[in-house]
Amino acid sequence: MFTVRLAKRECTDMSKIEYFLKRAQTGFLGMSLGNRPYVVPMNYTWWNGAIYVHGAEEGRRAQCLRANANVCFTIGEYYGTITSPIPAHTDTAYMSVVIDGRASFVTDIAEATEAMQSMLDKYVPGFYDQPLASSHVEKYRSSLGSKTAIMKIDPIAIVAKENAPVQEKMFHPGMKNR
């Protein structure tokens, strides 16, 4: 397993990591097929200690995952630029999490429905007046006719880094070095 080279940036607080995973918006799913890497941005949910994503049951992503279940899921959020009178000390405020894991296709309709409900609760909270029906998950087809697959990424290792914002040093338009 890899470690964070700049140890002062490592975050090991799992409650902070889980909070970040629950609210961050986009993750990047890294896969490989043979010696060809493939990374795709994904909406996701962190639910029951795993990452869940969804997409077409067919296509490049599905082909990669069926051939090689070892994946990397990366989430990063930019919080702004931290200024300094010394140009080389200007820095970025951020948090990022890298999850090495194993992907699988969810075949249990109850788990798939709950994972999709978790995703709806994250991206459109309160929008629907009823919970997602499992029949919707079972029967849904994309505009291209593909069945939707729900994929679960079970973490093997989670590494997080952060550089917290320093409010009085955060850049804003019009700010000058004085």
Image (cartoon, rainbow, N blue to C red):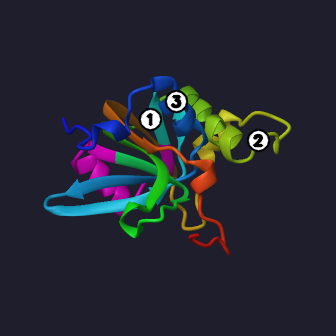
Q: Is residue 67 left or right of residue 84?
A: left
The vertical placement of 152 against 173, above or below, is above
Kind of residue indicated by mark 3: Lys
- Residue marked by disc 1: 106
The vertical placement of 38 against 121, above or below, is below
Q: Which mark is residue 78?
A: none
Can residue 154 be seen at all in this image of the molecule? yes
In what element is the residue under mark 3?
helix
In what element is the residue under mark 1?
loop
Mark 3 or mark 2, whichever is nearer to me: 3
Label 3 with label 1: CB-CB less than 8 Å: no
Q: Which quadrant holds residue 40?
A: bottom left
- Residue marked by disc 2: 125
| Picture residue at 28% right of the left edge, 53% below the top | 31
Which of the pair 99/134 is nearer the observer?
99
Q: Position of residue 58 (x, y in %)?
A: 40, 58
Which of the pair 74/59 is nearer the observer?
74
| Picture residue at 52% right of the left edge, 24% below the top | 15
Q: Is residue 130 left or right of residue 84?
A: right
- Residue 138 highlighted magenta (yes or no): no
Name the image quarter holding the C terminus: bottom right
Q: Which mark is residue 16?
A: 3
Kind of residue indicated by mark 1: Val
Q: Position of residue 98 (x, y in %)?
A: 35, 43
Which one is earlier in the sequence, the residue at label 2 or at label 1? 1
Label 2 with label 1: CB-CB less than 8 Å: no
Q: Measure the alpha-carbon separation of dots 2 and 1.
A: 23 Å
Kind of residue indicated by mark 2: Pro
Q: Measure the alpha-carbon separation of dots 3 and 1.
A: 27 Å
Which one is earlier in the sequence, the residue at label 3 or at label 1? 3
